[in-house]
Image: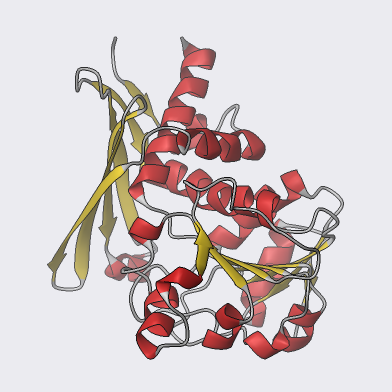
Amino acid sequence: MIPAIIPRDRGEEGLEWLAVAAAIADGHERPRALVADSLLHHADDALLNRSAWVEGLGIAVKVATVFPGNVASGGETLGGAVVLCSDKDGQLEAVLDFHLVTKWKTAGDSLLAATRLARKDSRKILLVGAGAQARNLHDAYAAAFPEAHFTVWNRSPEGARRFVADRPGTAIADDLQAAVAGADIISCSTMARAPLVLGEWLRPGQHLDLVGAYGPGMREVDDAALVRSRLFVDSRDTTVNHIGEIMDPIASGAITADHIVADYYQPASFRRQTDDEITVFKNGGGAHLDLMVSRHILEVWRARHG
């Protein structure tokens, strides 16, 4: 079979948020993924390769280039592709656009967690951050919570106004503390290196989704938020020793690794227990999730294009 080349625009045809979340759930019913990362630096630029192998699902290598200097010329900072191969014979099956896979993987990951951890009657969703990822999270959450009202908070008021222009009906919050207190679901997708949301602001019954902190030295919430909550991650293998949101409070002794209730490989435990508990989900976004979503995108592509 000729390998599929799946671009960003046409690759979105036929994709649905709840179906992507279901594909991630189905992928975790298979044997635990083998994952590995490699990182190369050249001056200010970087090349990240993230690899995953899931028996019965396939092999994927996500190649991500990071060129910060592109911003000055109006270009994109991130680029790359996902290479998807069969785990039966190793043959190439597809090459998918990096942005396509990352968009649907990241927001689909948070969506799956919210369907299990957020209260079913959640109606007020706060988005902390107003970038491209926040737009994806808005659309993903709207699929599962169609009656929800959205509010966005952003450090830059101009960024918040641009967000509302793209997603009409979204309110703008000026006071982050007050916005957090009034929300049922709080989804953070920022590049913060110091906590934005404080544990003392949280109230019983809320669900907190942490997307932005993806490496050491990055935090979106403080230790108190984790101590007060039941903490979940998509994968222990790609969060505990890799992301500041988990590494820092463990290093300080605020929590231990045992404070993590479950990851996706423990579906029976990955649930809200009471209406009053606070749940926190750390979206780590490992390569195994790229593999699961890439496989789903390829299946939808083949169903439409043969």
Identify whether 121 is placed above or below 229. Answer: above
Is residue 158 or residue 250 the one in the foreground? 250
8 vs 82, left or right, is right
Residue 277 shows in this picture? yes
Q: In which quarter of the image is the N terminus?
A: top left
Is residue 30 or residue 268 the one in the foreground? 268
- x 35%, y 81%: residue: 217
Q: Where is residue 67 in the image (x, y as percent from the top left)?
A: 27, 64
- x 43%, y 77%: residue: 256
262 vs 97, left or right, is right
Q: Where is residue 234 in the image (x, y as percent from the top left)?
A: 48, 55
Picture colour scheme: secondary structure
- x 29%, y 19%: residue: 3
Identify whether 117 is placed above or below 189. Answer: above
Residue 186, located in which quarter of the rendered image? bottom right
Residue 91, located in which quarter of the rendered image? top left
Identify whether 145 is placed above or below 218. Answer: above
- x 62%, y 33%: residue: 19
Q: Position of residue 44 (x, y in %)?
A: 20, 73
Q: How many marks?
A: 0
Residue 94, located in which quarter of the rendered image? top left
Residue 282 shows in this picture? no
Q: Where is residue 22 in the image (x, y as percent from the top left)?
A: 59, 35
